[in-house]
Amino acid sequence: MSRYFRAEIIENSPANRNHNLLILTPHEFSEHPIPGQFYMIGTDCSYDPLLKRPFSVFRRFAGEVYFLYRIKGKGTERMRQMKKGQIVNMLGPLGNGYPLPGKNLTPLLIAGGIGIASLFPLVEKLGNNAILFYGGRTANELLMLDELRRMAGEVIISTDDGSIGEKGTVVDTFKKLLASHLSAIGYQLIYACGPTPMLEAVSKIAVEKGIKGYISMEENMACGVGACLGCAVKTKKGYKRVCKEGPVFPIEEIVW
Ligand SMILES: Cc1cc2nc3c(=O)[nH]c(=O)nc-3n(C[C@H](O)[C@H](O)[C@H](O)COP(=O)(O)OP(=O)(O)OC[C@H]3O[C@@H](n4cnc5c(N)ncnc54)[C@H](O)[C@@H]3O)c2cc1C
Ligand code: FES
């Protein structure tokens, strides 16, 4: 079944200074995504496939698909300018998504910056079983805090400048709490999404402590469907495509 479809923009509004919330309603059938899957979104009105960019599904609600995106370069700047009522070309849902934890495991979710877009639907699914570590540069970079606090069992915030929550990186805070109050929790499973150095640091801690888990990798993508090999990453089982075999990988599998 084709995963290409067209969708209409219902809303494209600022979530803060450099992030937008995009809500789209599909005009054709599109499959229901699972947390951790993503879509390639056309960043202009043409059919040029090279102008599509990958974005995690942030929410699927009442037939609409929500995305939270950071304005970074050319493609996302074009997205920021897209207007309500405009039709965009979409491809998805793509990738594998997060496997759910078994019954006796406590999920520890670690989100750095816009990594929260990918983990948000997992928090929604896991509800108060989830312990979420969420870090950003400064207080007004953190998004959807009220919703996250309502959904998760615990939300531990950190900012690089200490303007809200713990001062330091999300990895610093995670490491500190792992050694203190989290040490009482028997079986833990990590889910992480964020900048590559954050994922590398989390993976090293997980391997050192013998904690299993999953990380969602971000690579530049051209095709999004496994054809161009542009998104391949080195794993212990050879090179794997982030768009096809990922973006979610077992935490110990990536070769850094
Ligand atoms: C699985 C996945 C999920 C993601 N989810 C999110 C999310 O939910 N929210 C979010 O904010 N970000 C997300 N990202 C990151 C997001 O895709 C990038 O920030 C976005 O693609 C940046 O695009 P840009 O054009 O604005 O930035 P640029 O920096 O201008 O471009 C991004 C990269 O695309 C390449 N590129 C530029 N032009 C072309 C072209 N014509 N054809 C092919 N490649 C080109 C460039 O080499 C550049 O490195 C995700 C990434 C992945 C892989
Ligand atoms: S983006 Fe082309 S193979 Fe992954």
Image (cartoon, rainbow, N blue to C red):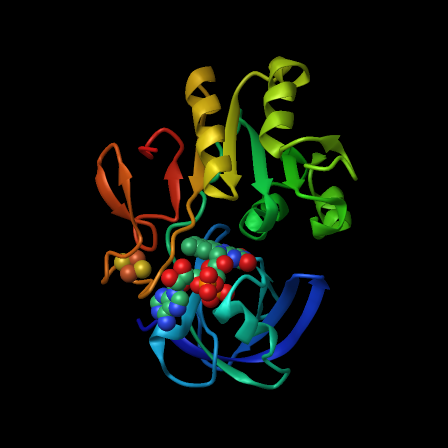
Q: Is residue 183 visible?
A: yes
| Residue located at (34% from left, 50% from top) | 242
Q: Position of residue 5 (x, y in %)?
A: 42, 77
Q: Position of residue 184 (x, y in %)?
A: 63, 13
In-front residue for pair 102/196: 196
Q: Position of residue 125 (x, y in %)?
A: 59, 46
Quadrant location, ligand no. 1: bottom left
Residue 11 shown left or right of residue 93 in the figure: right
Q: Quadrant of the N terminus?
A: bottom left
Q: Exactly how many numbered labels are in the figure?
A: 0
In-front residue for pair 147/113: 113
Q: Position of residue 176 (x, y in %)?
A: 64, 19
| Residue located at (56% from left, 31% from top) | 107
In-front residue for pair 65/138: 138
Q: Is residue 31 visible?
A: no
Query: Image quarter for residue 179?
Result: top right
| Residue located at (61% from left, 69% from top) | 22
Residue 6 shown left or right of residue 165 in the figure: left
Q: Quadrant of the C terminus?
A: top left
Is residue 205 depicted above or below 11 in this figure? above
| Residue located at (61% from left, 17% from top) | 185
